[in-house]
Image (cartoon, coloured by chain):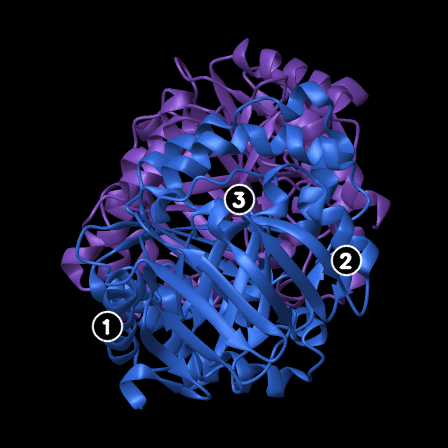
Chain colours: A purple, B blue
Amino acid sequence: MDPRVEEHAKIITEWSTSIKPGDMVVINSSPDGHELVVALHKTIAKAGGRVVTLMTSEEAARAYYDGASDETLQIVPEHMKALTESCDVYIVIRSPVNTKALANVDPKRIMINSKTQQEIQGIRLGKRWSLTVHPCQTLAQQANMGLEEYRDFVYGATLIDWAEESKMMHVMKEHLENHKDIRFVGPETDLYASTEGRIWIASDGKHNMPSGEVFTAPVEDTVEGKIYFDIPFLQQGKVIEGVRLTFEKGEVVDFSAEKEEATLKQIIEIDEGSRRLGEMAIGTNRGIKQYTLNMLFDEKIGDTIHCALGRAYKDNNGTNESAVHVDMIKTMHEGEIYAGDELIYSKGKYFYEM
Amino acid sequence: MDPRVEEHAKIITEWSTSIKPGDMVVINSSPDGHELVVALHKTIAKAGGRVVTLMTSEEAARAYYDGASDETLQIVPEHMKALTESCDVYIVIRSPVNTKALANVDPKRIMINSKTQQEIQGIRLGKRWSLTVHPCQTLAQQANMGLEEYRDFVYGATLIDWAEESKMMHVMKEHLENHKDIRFVGPETDLYASTEGRIWIASDGKHNMPSGEVFTAPVEDTVEGKIYFDIPFLQQGKVIEGVRLTFEKGEVVDFSAEKEEATLKQIIEIDEGSRRLGEMAIGTNRGIKQYTLNMLFDEKIGDTIHCALGRAYKDNNGTNESAVHVDMIKTMHEGEIYAGDELIYSKGKYFYEM
């Protein structure tokens, strides 16, 4: 086995989920994640945990939609609920075979089914949980890479010193919370927001793996100014590029995109909340050296910031509500970040590197 | 998809487990069974069931043993228990990647782990359950066949008219239960046993799929005579061939094998129960036209009988206890089966065909 798979399993087991003797662990993986499932069985066994492995499959999910009536989709899967309630740790491995298997299922039917999962999802988020990927051809192709190249990319982002990263990120969180506002400055960009009463979270690999972002929910109606997002991102199957947004009193008052502007317009006009920001964040993972159109990685790229239109997280004390949460990313090698009067980041250096 | 996979899924869903709206269904499959998992998602959805799919993997099991201490192996997986308790139907798909992955794990450690599964296994057997195979290279190779040939073999055994088979098997069960004993006669064979107070079970595809046997547990100390088993079988990784047994007052008093006699001797001498018969049965599935060293199929071959040394089933009112249950099979094209004074089978014909 590629020793990096074993190292990945060790990080998930020891750092992300801190598995200890007697822990009841659920692994949820697609068949293509099998190699990481095997490696995790060994590391979890060593830590004294017991494992149940679920097989998810986009093709099976599609077949289920094809067979089920709307009534059937409304039945709560009580056995899934019982399993989730009785576990201590829930690990999800994404290694899809076909990310488009559900493309032609009526979104309303997916919504009906999702509602039966909401309570279960809530229970899951109350456990120690981790979400990661296992490199596969499907993700490599989506990232515009060969498989070996993609493996190097994933492990470059994942197999880093998380204790050290965490320390730096928590220092940054403290500095950010010592002030009441945030400002992103750079080419075509000067965006301000109050963060008073909001919580900054250092996402240090306890949930997402890889991670590497310090994020909050801005006070919704205080966002002012303009911003240019130079990293492309995927939404509704389209790659949107070169987004420019202008905010007044928290609302988007002007917008454009160099590519797929119509899709951007559609997102902004979905509901009241989708024209406001639900998240402002700083990416810190320098192991991620390029975007791959996969938000799990892209929003964590070191020396970037990102903002999300739409839903805010309660954990940040955020209040903005929306059906969507759409992240957009900007590189900051030419930019600066201020918290109050403090320069937090300047042109390739975080405050603790200046 | 091969339409036979869809037909197989339909039989499991409708005939074997009778899935109805609201049923909580667990599928337990190796990654190689994915195609049947997909087909089952559609048929179960149509029937109104909800599905949770477990991924079993010999390689993951091996990794778990390699990592776990003996203490860890003694922990009951409570989340597996909760899942099993909360389901209505449990479907197991065998489609192994490597049947020898656990070959070098200390059998004592496998036993320790198995004990924590006993209660869960008991709960599972109280549900509607079904065990089947999905054709794969590993099983094809074990059967000494190419994959397409093996697919033909499996579906020939499985995609039959189970309602019709069941009817015949239940008629046979009634005839057998109208008498108090059973006698197998043929070349080098004349074996008698009392079946008084014992139950004959028609195994008609509700649990094993494929199935096709009518079986009971003989009254242990009444087995008398001799028998020659002409179909090879696999035990402890060895293929045992041409077994001859002689019984007096229920016990093996003489034995030989044309191949691997030492292994046969070892089995017979394991404990008190392993020198007595725990099962006597008639195979009825004429869709199975040859042996493949896989007992799920071999013991059901039409126009055969089989006997098992060792443990009897409680469902038959059997009482013989043993650590083993070893089935051995004999073709009956030249033989006869009597229940009391009634000729149940003669040289290629069951009583209802004579």
Do the numbered discs 3 and 2 sit on residues whose CB atoms are within 8 Å?
no
Q: Amino acid at mark 3?
A: Arg
Asked if B306 appears above or below B154 in the picture, the reply is above
SS category of the residue bearing label 3? loop
Give the labeled residue for mark 1.
B171
Do the numbered discs 1 and 3 sit on residues whose CB atoms are within 8 Å?
no
Q: Quadrant of residue B352?
A: bottom left
Give the labeled residue for mark 3.
B311
Mark 1 neighbour class, 10 Å CA radius: few under 14, some 14 to 19, many 20 or more: some
Q: Nearer the viewer, residue B34 or A180?
A: B34
Which residue does the image show at 44% across and 84% down from the upper left? B286
Q: Nearer the viewer, residue A327 or A221?
A: A327
Q: Quadrant of residue A242?
A: bottom right
Question: Mark 3 or mark 2: which comes first in sequence?
Answer: 2
Which residue does the image show at 66% across and 38% down from the upper left? A210
Mark 3 neighbour class, 10 Å CA radius: few under 14, some 14 to 19, many 20 or more: many
Observer able to see residue A262: no
Asked if B113 appears above or below A267 in the picture, the reply is above
Observer able to see residue B331: yes
SS category of the residue bearing label 2? loop
Asked if B179 appears above or below B302 in the picture, the reply is above
Give the labeled residue for mark 2.
B237
Mark 2 neighbour class, 10 Å CA radius: few under 14, some 14 to 19, many 20 or more: few
Output the chain of dot 2: B
Q: Disc 2 and disc 1: Cα gap in Å? A: 37 Å
The answer to whether residue A116 is left or right of residue A31 is left
Q: Amino acid at mark 1?
A: Val
Q: Disc 1 and disc 3: Cα gap in Å? A: 26 Å
Q: Amino acid at mark 2?
A: Gly
Question: Mark 1 or mark 3: which comes first in sequence?
Answer: 1
Are discs 1 and 3 both within one chain? yes
Question: Mark 2 or mark 1: which comes first in sequence?
Answer: 1
